[in-house]
Image (spheres, rainbow, N blue to C red):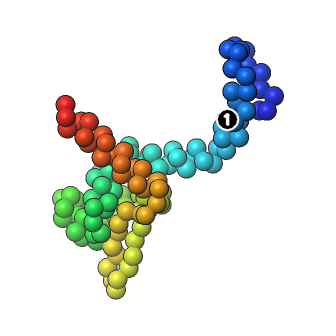
Amino acid sequence: MTNLILLHHHNEKNFFSGMNEQLSNIGTFQMISEIFRQLGDTTRIRIFWLLCHREECVVNISDILKMSSPAVSHHLRPLRNSGLIVSRREGKEVYYHAADTEQSRLMYNMIEQVMKVTSSN
């Protein structure tokens, strides 16, 4: 892609020089897509938002969201796999909370901003 010749040249010298490397890194875009995929499910957003505010076990999450424990576990798995939440075991109980990562903070901030915008309408 370094010698990219576009059909429509708009006098933008070296426009793609910095972008070529990023555009070629498909793995990065796949990771971003996986993280944003979590936004496509209302229940996952609700669970993630809750876990940004407090650590909880599956039973309590189930009670709070009025869902079955297996349904909650089904939604926790992809959130954990995407790195947005983490878990810790204490005896037989597993507790979940938002990961302390830049991706998790960005996702939380985005949800908060959208909540502000939609609640002001």
Looking at the image, residue 27 lies above or below residue 69: above
Image point (50%, 49%), residue name:
34
* Residue 7 on image: x %, y %: 73, 15
Nearest the camera: 1 or 68? 1
Residue 2: quadrant of the picture: top right
| Residue 107 appears in the rendering | yes
Quadrant of the image for the C terminus?
top left
Q: Quick check: 50 left or right of 77?
A: left
Label 1 sits on a secondary structure element that is helix
Residue 77: quadrant of the picture: bottom left
Image point (69%, 27%), residue name:
15
Using a 10 Å C-alpha cutoff, classify the residue at mark 1 as few (fewer than 14 neighbours), some (14 to 19) or many (20 or more). Answer: few
Q: Quick check: 119 left or right of 33?
A: left
Nearest the camera: 69 or 81? 81
* Residue 104 on image: x %, y %: 42, 56
* Residue at the limit of the structure toward the right, as seen here: 3
Nearest the camera: 102 or 40? 102
| Residue 42 appears in the rendering | no
Image point (57%, 46%), residue name:
30
Dot 1 amino acid type: Met
* Residue 92 on image: x %, y %: 33, 83
Looking at the image, residue 59 lies above or below residue 91: above
Q: Quick check: 18 left or right of 29?
A: right
Dot 1 corresponds to which residue?
19
Quadrant of the image for the N terminus?
top right
How many numbered discs sit on the rendered protein?
1
Q: Quick check: 84 left or right of 47?
A: right
Image point (73%, 22%), residue name:
13
* Residue 18 on image: x %, y %: 69, 36
